[in-house]
Image (tube, grey):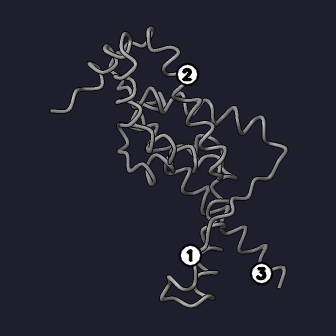
């Protein structure tokens, strides 16, 4: 039977192995969230490590207070990603994803290039959104969280998250429409 987060946190205050179990339970979730926030593997790995380092450093002061340990980790990750964006706002970071090798794909090279371009356009559009809009979209679509869980992570009411989610979708549509207008102007 799997131990609850609350029991593992209490054990982790005395036993580092218990924190290791929490790490294994949440590392992929936190990494995925951070990757979509910063757009590259190197910084996502660094921020993931920093998230867990901060959680371990302050584990003695952690109290559940109705928020799960996973939500606590997401809040730390969000703060680190926000700081990262502020510190890197002068740089444009464009992720270079690995294209599938043509030998492994049944699709032609043109199709692969088009799919990659569409992903890059979407990632750029998301990164042009506000931090809150990015966060709500990533938690909803990447982490597959419901509005109630997102509300806990973001420290907002469920209704406020629904409204924020709607505004984020509208903002994303505007970003994508603007990109298409700019692209048409180039041709």
- Horizontal side of residue 60 vs 35, given as left or right: left
> What kind of element bears circle 2?
helix
Q: Quadrant of residue 95?
A: bottom right
Dot 2 surroundings within 10 Å: few (below 14), some, or many (20 or more)? some
Residue 89: percent from left, percent from top: 79, 42
Question: Toward the viewer: 132 or 50?
Answer: 50
Residue 121: percent from left, percent from top: 66, 67
> What kind of element bears circle 1?
loop
Residue at image coords 65%, 74%:
117
Dot 1 surroundings within 10 Å: few (below 14), some, or many (20 or more)? few
State whether residue 181 is above or below residue 132.
below
Marks 3 and 1: CB-CB under 8 Å? no
Q: If the image is split into quadrants, where does the N terminus sit? A: top left
Q: If the image is split into quadrants, where does the C terminus sit? A: bottom right
- Horizontal side of residue 148 vs 109, given as left or right: left
Dot 3 surroundings within 10 Å: few (below 14), some, or many (20 or more)? few
State whether residue 80 is above or below residue 175.
above
């Amino acid at each position: 039977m799997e131990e609850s987060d609350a029991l593992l946190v209490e054990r982790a205050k005395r036993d580092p192995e218990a924190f290791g179990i929490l790490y294994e339970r949440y590392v992929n979730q936190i990494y995925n969230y951070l990757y979509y926030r910063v757009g590259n593997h190197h910084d996502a790995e660094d921020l993931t490590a920093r998230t867990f380092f901060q959680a371990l450093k302050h584990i003695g002061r952690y109290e559940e207070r109705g928020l799960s340990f996973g939500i606590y980790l997401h809040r730390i990750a969000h703060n680190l990603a926000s700081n990262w964006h502020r510190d890197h706002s002068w740089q444009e970071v464009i992720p270079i994803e690995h294209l599938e090798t043509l030998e492994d794909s049944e699709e032609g090279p043109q199709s692969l290039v088009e799919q990659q371009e569409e992903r890059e356009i979407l990632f750029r559009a998301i990164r042009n959104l506000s931090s809150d809009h990015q966060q709500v979209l990533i938690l909803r679509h990447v982490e597959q969280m419901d509005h109630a869980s997102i509300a806990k992570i973001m420290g907002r009411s469920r209704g406020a998250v629904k409204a924020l989610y709607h505004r984020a979708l509208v903002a994303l549509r505007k970003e994508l429409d603007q990109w298409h207008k700019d692209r048409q102007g180039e041709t």
